[in-house]
Amino acid sequence: MVKTMRTVYLDHAATTPIAPEVRETVAHAMAECWGNPSSLHLFGRKARDLLDEARVTVAHALGCLDAEVFFTSSGTEANNMAIFGAARVAPPHKRHLITTAIEHHAVLHACQRLQQDGWEVTYLPVDSKGMVDPDDVRRALRAETWLVSVMHANNEIGTLQPVGEIAAICREQGVWLHCDAVQTFGLLDMDVQRLGVDMLSVSAHKLYGPMGVGALYIRGGVKIAPLLVGGAQERELRAGTENVPAIAGFAKAVELSRARYSTAWQKIWQLRERLRARLQELVPDIQVNGHPQQCHPGILSVTFARVSAESLLIALDRYGVAASAGAACSAGSIEPSHVLLALGMSETQAMSTIRLSLGRGNTPEEIDFAAEVIAEQVHRLRRKAVATVSASSI
Ligand SMILES: Cc1ncc(COP(=O)(O)O)c(C=O)c1O
């Protein structure tokens, strides 16, 4: 039995703890720059300056112009803005969209809404490691295709998609490509020019920034329609007074992340590999999901046969280990994850899968502790299941 009680946070893909420097920046902005950035007086100008600086910081991190960055309330809104915004300007004969079966619901549900409005949507399959084949994109493109949306890293299994190759195909055909990069922005040099995308969504709370703020990169020349109408904020593409303190915090988080590009990926990957190896030692029959190399460094999706993910997560929480399921909680019932099913997993396997997601604050000691707790609880739940079956057969 693991004795020391401590807490280990392994749910960074859900959200990250706010960096202390970000907290200070947000508090400072709330105290000193609370004016409306659209006001012309001193108070407004102070807020406007902060907003402008933040836009430049985010633009530098994306390798684009500040005029190409549009702040939103979240990654979800950025995805919605890209998809609905592009759809609204589509000519009547161009109502086909291509996406993948494993996108975040912020993309998938937007696509489903468009289908209700008469759009045709192709959901590309993925292989057993969660990878999209760029040739499938090429084959799915038609004269009517208006937009392609492919995520950078999957939030449940971590697989990184060949976005650069897909971008080249889209460019050849003159079709816009949107990319949901919410899970990877802040971990690597996300240069939108090199990637070749037309639109890209990011979110602050996945990179140690505040919740409720994100951004959409829109390449100059790509004209989409606004989702929110009202004031002329964000170059008339996103009405509503900007959340200046949160945006300033976002920019601070971006700055801090950029300073760690060279080390964070490697450090987190080493911890992930340590956790994977430890778990494989302690529970030899685990299945690790996703691509073994082309993978987000911090996401480890593991299937424990004969164990309910829900029971395991509750047990882990009792021992201070915070993780999440590869399943989405909806309306009080746990549904098997669409991502895991798309890999070819059975519902039973999907319901036995948990996601451990690591961040830059985790330590090797925490990882060893978590591995022991997980293994112990998996063995306990398996013994309990066997005992229940034997008791019921008496
Ligand atoms: C891949 C991906 N896209 C979009 C989102 C939504 O971002 P937000 O929480 O900022 O709305 C998430 C959040 O988990 C995500 O993982």
Image (spheres, helix red, strand yellow):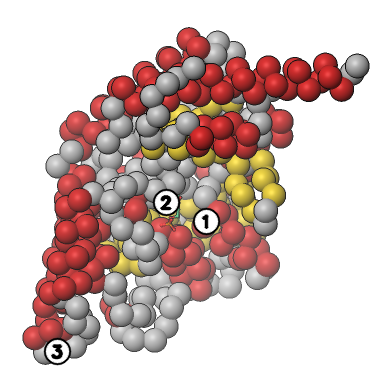
Image marks 2 and 1: residues in contact by CB distance under 8 Å: yes
Q: Is residue 84 left or right of residue 199?
A: right
Q: Residue 180, which numbered label?
A: 2
Q: Residue at x 67, y 53 (%)?
A: 332
Which picture quadrant has residue 312?
top right
Residue 23, percent from left and from top: 22, 57
Residue 22, percent from left and from top: 20, 55
Q: Residue at x 24, y 33 (%)?
A: 264
Q: Is residue 386 left or right of residue 47?
A: right
Judged from the image, the secondary structure of the residue bearing numbered disc 1 is helix
Name which residue type carries label 1.
Answer: Val
Residue 391, percent from left and from top: 84, 19
Residue under label 1? 107
- Nearest-to-viewer mark from 3 and 1: 3
Q: Is mark 1 within 8 Å of ligand 1?
A: yes
Residue under label 3? 40
Q: Is any part of residue 32 visible from this angle?
A: yes
Q: Is mark 3 within 8 Å of ligand 1?
A: no
Q: Is mark 2 within 8 Å of ligand 1?
A: yes
Q: Earlier in the sequence, mark 3 or mark 1?
A: 3
Q: Residue at x 31, y 67 (%)?
A: 71
